[in-house]
Image (cartoon, helix red, strand yellow):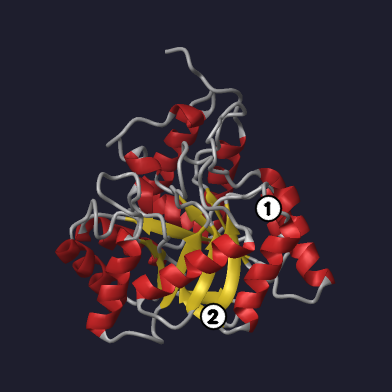
């Protein structure tokens, strides 16, 4: 395993995503995956207070509860950095995501209290706002996150699914008021570039304006979810329509070439490409089996050449519009 800084912390360059743990993935398998991750040097875990509310009978706390039980049974405290997210859990009547709890002061404080209880912790290492909340003023959201840091309830704060204008403005508000700024950003990101007309609804892809911004912010750590597109790079599932455009097939061909040259799988090359990028991105690893986890962990030791990275960058840069016609 390799490590990098996350604020004042040192974390593994891969972060284990636990969205399905304790629900889609049963408890025993979830514990085995967490154990293997730590055995191989992993030290960074990601969850949220809403996983998996969309399943029948779930209140959204399944993943946090599972992680909390695992931490307690293994007696692990300081060795693991745990990140969780608030703001996306359904609250009240209506259709999601319109009825999400949001990022108001009251909503965040209530959500954090629940997360602490489920995780069995006195503080949260990294707290994200899960989805942007334009109904709440940025000043209020920045202030409540900052107060949680000041009170020792949260160590570091970040945001997810943000556009560059609101995210940069939120960081500027914090700087002007001498408050802790958001120092982590988690976005949808993968090797294939989305088509120009791609619509991810409430999810936000890591686009060029945001990449340009993050490259100028040395205190900011960028993380990526949906890195493997659910199996699209191995042919397990088709490439999502949002990533289908004139350059998709050629980009996949270059990915396959580099994988063959490196003696690696396409999935491993995607992870390695992220880790070698500018800025370097921490991928969230979503797995349901030990084989999938080991494949991801092996990618940490894959050192792509400058020429290979340049070829991958060039191949993904060319794209047009969503090819909806088959």
- State the mark number for residue 252: none
Q: Is residue 131 left or right of residue 26?
A: right
Residue under label 2, please give it.
Answer: 153
Q: Residue 36 appears in which quarter of the rendering?
A: bottom left
Q: Nearer the viewer, residue 246 or 43?
A: 43
Q: Residue at x 84, y 70 (%)?
A: 176
Question: At which x and y percent is residue 198?
Answer: 56, 30
| Secondary structure state at the residue bearing disc 1 | loop
Label 1 and label 2: CA atoms lie apart by: 22 Å
Q: Secondary structure at mark 2?
A: loop
Q: Is residue 244 visible?
A: yes
Residue 136: image tag = 1
Q: How packed is label 1: few (under 14 Cα within 10 Å), some, or many (20 or more)?
A: few
Outermost residue on the top side: it is: 325
Residue 320 to residue 69: above or below: above
Given residues 114 and 26, the one toward you in this image is 114
Image side of residue 174 versus residue 71, left or right? right
Question: Which quadrant: the N terminus?
Answer: bottom left
Query: Disc 1 or 2, which lies upstream in sequence?
Result: 1
Q: Quadrant of residue 21?
A: bottom left
Residue at image location 62% in from the left, 28% down from the top: 196
Along the viewing direction, whichever of 228 and 66 lies nearer the viewer: 66
Q: Are marks 1 and 2 in contact (CB under 8 Å)?
A: no
Residue drawn at (56%, 64%) of the image: 108
Residue shown at 42%/69% (left/top)? 115
């Amino acid at each position: 395993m390799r490590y990098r800084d996350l604020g004042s912390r040192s974390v593994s360059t891969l972060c284990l995503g636990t969205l399905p743990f304790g629900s889609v993935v049963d408890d025993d398998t979830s514990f085995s995956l967490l154990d293997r991750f730590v055995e191989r040097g992993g030290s960074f875990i990601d969850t949220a207070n809403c996983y998996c509310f969309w399943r029948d009978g779930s209140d959204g706390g399944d993943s946090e509860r599972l992680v909390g039980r695992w931490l307690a049974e293994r007696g692990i405290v300081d060795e693991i950095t745990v990140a969780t997210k608030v703001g996306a859990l359904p609250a009240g009547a209506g259709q999601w995501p319109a009825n999400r709890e949001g990022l108001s002061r009251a909503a965040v404080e209530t959500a954090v209290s629940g997360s602490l209880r489920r995780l069995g912790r006195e503080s949260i290492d990294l707290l994200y706002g899960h989805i942007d909340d334009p109904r709440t003023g940025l000043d209020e959201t920045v202030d409540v996150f900052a107060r949680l840091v000041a009170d020792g309830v949260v160590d570091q704060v970040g945001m997810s699914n943000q556009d560059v204008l609101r995210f940069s403005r939120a960081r500027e508000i914090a700087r002007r008021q001498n408050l802790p700024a958001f120092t982590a950003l988690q976005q949808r990101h993968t090797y294939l570039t989305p088509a120009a007309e791609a619509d991810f609804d409430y999810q936000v892809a890591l686009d060029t304006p945001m990449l340009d911004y993050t490259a100028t912010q040395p205190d900011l750590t960028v993380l990526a979810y949906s890195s493997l597109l659910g199996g699209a790079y191995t042919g397990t599932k088709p490439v999502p329509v949002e990533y289908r455009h004139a350059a998709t097939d050629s980009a996949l061909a270059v990915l396959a070439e580099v994988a063959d040259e490196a003696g690696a799988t396409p999935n491993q090359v995607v992870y390695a490409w992220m880790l070698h990028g500018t800025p370097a991105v921490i991928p969230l690893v979503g797995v349901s089996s030990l084989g999938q986890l080991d494949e991801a962990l092996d990618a940490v030791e894959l050192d792509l050449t400058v020429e290979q990275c340049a070829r991958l960058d060039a191949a993904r840069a060319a794209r047009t519009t969503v090819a909806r016609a088959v």
